[in-house]
């Protein structure tokens, strides 16, 4: 089976890396695992050895046929676009771990879908383009710190686990890859409206070179609060906690 560019496919060819990804799932607090984009099943062969119930979602029908042929023991193999699925419907109301060698062209969208189902996903271990992986776990002040860093880190603690070289795939991508683990924080209540929090983060980073005093006018208008020295900062200078406190203050003043 050849990789298809339309699906952003790069098949992992290293057994040791597949095993390392599978064993990076702690399997704490859940008994089900959802693998996205299993392809030829390199990671699947190690995931199916875990005590968790395994469900796979693959968009490429040719790959689904391949998996059915070489892994006939798989019971929950879904031929569908992960981004369009109702995860509660296919996984049930309980908790599950999320994993995969994610297609680079939709990796950020996969993370945002995970956020939408954070009440069900306590853990995620996944392979991304290294640049994206680093961005997700980046601290404030970093050059790659941005919208996805803050939105994910508000609800999950992130760890960069290891880097994967291009020759570990067939065909080899033109970029390095990185594996990260996200562990859901115990307290999921950030104390403010998530939509407002998300909107503030996106708008401020949409004009990241401007001071908050300018970008926050759409939320605070002519509020005297904007004269506070805090608003002379730029968005990359704010921690996740700073953004949460800012959203709380906007909510109060509204």
Image (cartoon, grey):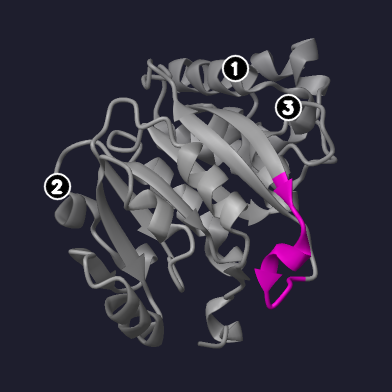
The stretch of residues the image draws in magenta is 163-173
Which of the 4 image quarters holds residue 12?
bottom right
* Mark 3 closeness class: few <14, some 14–19, many ≥20 residues within 10 Å: many
Q: Which residue is drawn at 47% across and 49% down?
A: 112
Secondary element type, mark 1: helix
Disc 2 element: loop
Where residue 119 sits: x, y (%)? 29, 33
At x 75% / y 27%, what residue is drawn?
A: 213
Was residue 172 drawn as part of the magenta stretch in this picture? yes
In the rendered image, which residue does mark 2 sit on? 92
Residue 218 at least partly seen = no
> Which part of the image, by quadrant, shows the C terminus?
top left
Q: Position of residue 37 (x, y in %)?
A: 44, 66
- Residue on which the image places disc 1: 241
Mark 3 or 2 closer to N-term?
2
Name the spot of residue 182 as percent of width and height, x first.
51, 34
Q: In this view, does 229 lie to the left or right of 170?
A: right
Task: Mark 1: give few (<14), some (14-19) or many (20+) Cα within 10 Å.
Answer: few
Label 2 Cα neighbours within 10 Å, binned few <14 / some 14-19 / many ≥20:
few
Give the quadrant of residue 222: top right
Q: Toward which corner of the image does residue 217 lie, by quadrant?
A: top right
Q: How far apart are marks 3 and 2 (CA)?
A: 34 Å
């Amino acid at each position: 089976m050849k990789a298809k560019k339309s699906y952003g496919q790069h098949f992992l060819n290293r057994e040791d890396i597949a095993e390392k990804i599978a064993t990076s799932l702690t399997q704490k607090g859940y008994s089900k695992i959802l693998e996205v984009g299993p392809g030829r099943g390199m990671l699947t062969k190690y995931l199916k050895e875990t005590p968790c119930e395994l469900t796979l979602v693959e968009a490429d029908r040719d790959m689904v046929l391949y998996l059915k042929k070489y892994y006939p023991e798989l019971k929950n193999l879904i031929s569908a676009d992960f981004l369009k699925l109702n995860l509660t419907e296919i996984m049930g109301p309980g908790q599950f771990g999320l994993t995969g060698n994610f297609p680079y062209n939709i990796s950020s969208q996969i993370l945002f879908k995970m956020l939408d189902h954070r009440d069900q996903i306590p853990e995620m271990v996944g392979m991304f383009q290294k640049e994206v992986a680093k961005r997700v776990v980046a601290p404030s002040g970093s050059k790659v710190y941005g919208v996805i860093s803050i939105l994910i880190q508000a609800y999950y603690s992130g760890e960069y686990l290891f880097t994967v070289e291009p020759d570990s795939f067939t065909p080899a991508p033109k970029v390095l890859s990185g594996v990260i683990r996200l562990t859901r924080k115990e307290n999921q209540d950030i104390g403010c409206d998530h939509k407002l929090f998300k909107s503030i983060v996106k708008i401020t980073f949409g004009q990241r070179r401007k001071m908050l005093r300018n970008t926050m006018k759409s939320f605070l208008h002519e509020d005297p609060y904007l004269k506070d020295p805090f608003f002379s900062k730029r968005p990359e200078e704010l921690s996740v906690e700073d953004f949460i406190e800012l959203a709380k203050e906007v909510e109060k003043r509204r």
